[in-house]
Amino acid sequence: MEVRITSREMVKPSSEEVFLRKPFSLSLFDQFIPPYYMTGISFYSKPNDSVQTLAGLKKSLSKALNQYYPLSGRTIDNRCIGSYDKGVPYVEARVKGCLADCIAQTEQEWIKELFPCQPFCSIPTSTSPQIAIQINVFDCGGIAIAACTSHKVMDATTVSAFMKSWAAYNRGSNGEIPNPDMFDIGSRLFPPLESIPQNYLSLIESLWFQEGWHTTRTFVFDNNAISTLKFQAKSKRLEHPTRTVSLVAFLWKYAMLASRVAWGRSKPSVLTQSVNLRPRLKSRLPQYTIGNLHCTAVSTYNSAERDIKLDHLAYLVREAIDIFNDRTCRLQSEDVLKFMTDQYNPVIDIATQGEVDFWGCTSWLNTLDGNLVDFGWGEPTSFGVWRSETRYYSFADAIVLKEMGKDKGVEAVITLDAKTMNVLEHHSEFLAFASPASGPYPNKSKV
């Protein structure tokens, strides 16, 4: 399919009063996050009037930026965001082809043309926009809205809240947040430091971003597979594993087994899970609170045993979350830096022993659901995550779990080094539960 860019511009908040706002402070959690872009793309059937639709999207985005004004600025010295007059890159493009054909494509690499920038690679903090948008209009009239969002100030919950606010403005509804005073509560509760210990920043960057060829594949778990895995993950120590714990344990197991085969040796393994802080703090924070209000639960496994038990891994996954939950209760009364560094100390201890497999897992289940983002012409026919295959200094071994839609199962978007992925995607035991996606966005309906 051919993609032709028709316009590029910077969309800024519609109210110039926003430009006079004081810098928006990052939180301590934001300071620990290396800057890179996440992605999301929603496909919509043909609106009534594409020309009017494009004009409306731009106008409503400008309104949404009045509320989410930090997204229009640039990061300063890893401490705050300012210069709100810089704006958001906004690209419009025409796609030669039909929306349905795009969703059914098995070749993912061309999808990069639907996005405004390169995702999941380390980016310069001070000059990079917080968000970039590309609106793609197909010959059939269908639309794909692609967003690249900087993880420096946006976690999945922030992205979801912003997209829903933008969509509400576009529908003509009031997209304003109900209590603006809570907007920056994350940075008020956990203010930034003058500087972060360099050894921790270096560790995070070295684990998250690596040279080498990385491959991304999407696998689908239907409800029958999930039910079976939940049963197999049960043990005396964990009687009721959730679908997330069961899936994470399953994916961790077969990632380890594939790595052993690919590299011919067993290595210590570290699994990190992103955990949303908003519902776990003493006073629950609203979903629209901006920033990286999540921390990391860490599980470690260091065994050369050939038969890795799923129920044991499920217990380790759940145990890490339970330990995290216990410590979170004391977070607002403790030294926050100590809380953060204590999270990474086990990783440092293992990393200093030599080679280590590091897997990062993020669950967007019940958090970032593109099917709820209605711009006024109905819910999307499909919502997906995309990243390119690259040799660049890019986000390494990672797993993202996302909904396929009500009662349709779960998608796992998995990125591994090419050798390990080649083993995984041909592993018969793995494929007995995980079905390779027929296209980049398999949760499609008729369009």
Image (spheres, helix red, strand yellow):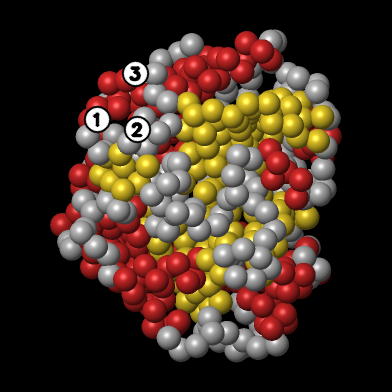
Q: Residue at x 42, y 58 (%)?
A: 34
Q: Quadrant of residue 57?
A: top right
The amino acid beneath tag 2 is Tyr
Q: Mark 3 points at which residue?
A: 15
Q: In this view, does 87 lie above or below 439?
A: above
Q: Which of marks 1 and 3 is nearer the N terminus?
A: 3
Classify mark 2: helix, strand or loop: loop
Depth order, front residue of 224/2:
2
The residue to which callout 1 is attached is: 21
Q: Please rate how many residues cluster around mark 1, counting C-alpha atoms within 10 Å: few if below 14, some from 14 to 19, many from 20.
A: few
| Tag 1 near tag 2, CB within 8 Å | yes
- Say above or below: 254 vs 175: below
Q: Three-letter amino acid code at disc 1?
A: Arg
Q: How far apart are marks 1 and 2 (CA)?
A: 8 Å
Residue identifier under label 2: 84
Residue drawn where x is 77% and y is 65% of the image: 425
